[in-house]
Amino acid sequence: MDGFFYWYSFGFCFLDFVFSIVYFRAMSINSALQNRSSHACELCSEPDTNLHGYVVPPKKDDSIDNLVALCSNCYGKITQSDFNDTNYWRFLTGSIWNEIPSVQALSYKILFKLSAEEWASETVESVQLDEAVINWANAEDDIEAARVIHKDAFGVVLATGDSVVLTQNLNVKGANFIAPKGTIVRKIKLVEDNAEQVEGKIEGDTIVILTKYLRKSTV
Ligand SMILES: [Zn+2]
């Protein structure tokens, strides 16, 4: 019993210690951000007693340099990608001149999304920002653009594990047979860096099939 008691009390102290570190860290980031923002949204300048710390993507860690303090309105719209009310964002013509890089990057990112509006495109063109800030603002869209998306002959997005149907007779090079139109290929694997190719097994051989010759199967 003695052994159990010591083990238990050690475990308890350890947990308590971990909780205090996490709690302390969350508090200190919060108060530093509160101080920097002077308790107002760093985009629209509205005072808010319940500011949200928003990490500007693609950054992930919540160190203060990556954060922007946002009011509930701005936070809600940004996290839901709601940029329909373009006039709401007019304050970005002011926040883009903020000296904090995370605020600059977020302002630039949203202004860029709204660049069909003349006031937004003019602001983007007139502002002088560090290259690092512009790269940060564009990084998420660049990652999205570089993503390889596989689609079948009809534009339906394919995933590894899907079944597909051949839409025409295919001459399988090297294996010396013709895979007839209508052949079902189960559990395809996407070719990582080529959106036009998938791998699948036909008659026991793994072959590369071009996505333009197949259609996603629901059976
Ligand atoms: Zn705001």
Image (cartoon, rainbow, N blue to C red):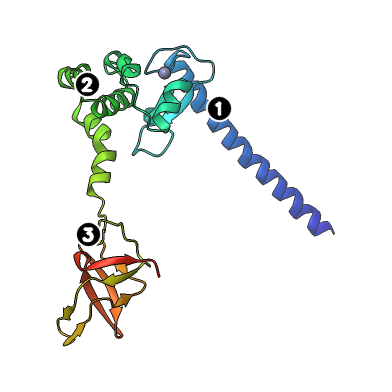
- The percent position of residue 166, horizontal first and vertical second, equals 25, 73
| Disc 2: which residue | 117
| Disc 1: which residue | 27
Which of the pair 34/195 is nearer the observer? 195
- Position of residue 45 relative to residue 214, above or below, is above
- Position of residue 168 relative to residue 176, above or below, is above
What amino acid is found at the position of numbered circle 3 in the picture? Ala
Label 2 vs label 3: CA separation?
Answer: 34 Å
Q: Earlier in the sequence, mark 2 or mark 3?
A: 2
| Label 3: few (<14), some (14–19) or many (≥20) C-alpha neighbours in 10 Å | some
| Disc 3: which residue | 195
Q: Residue at x 80, y 53 (%)?
A: 5
Quarter placement of the N terminus: bottom right
Label 1 vs label 2: CA separation?
Answer: 39 Å
Q: Secondary structure at mark 1?
A: helix
Q: Residue at x 42, y 33 (%)?
A: 80
Q: Earlier in the sequence, mark 1 or mark 3?
A: 1
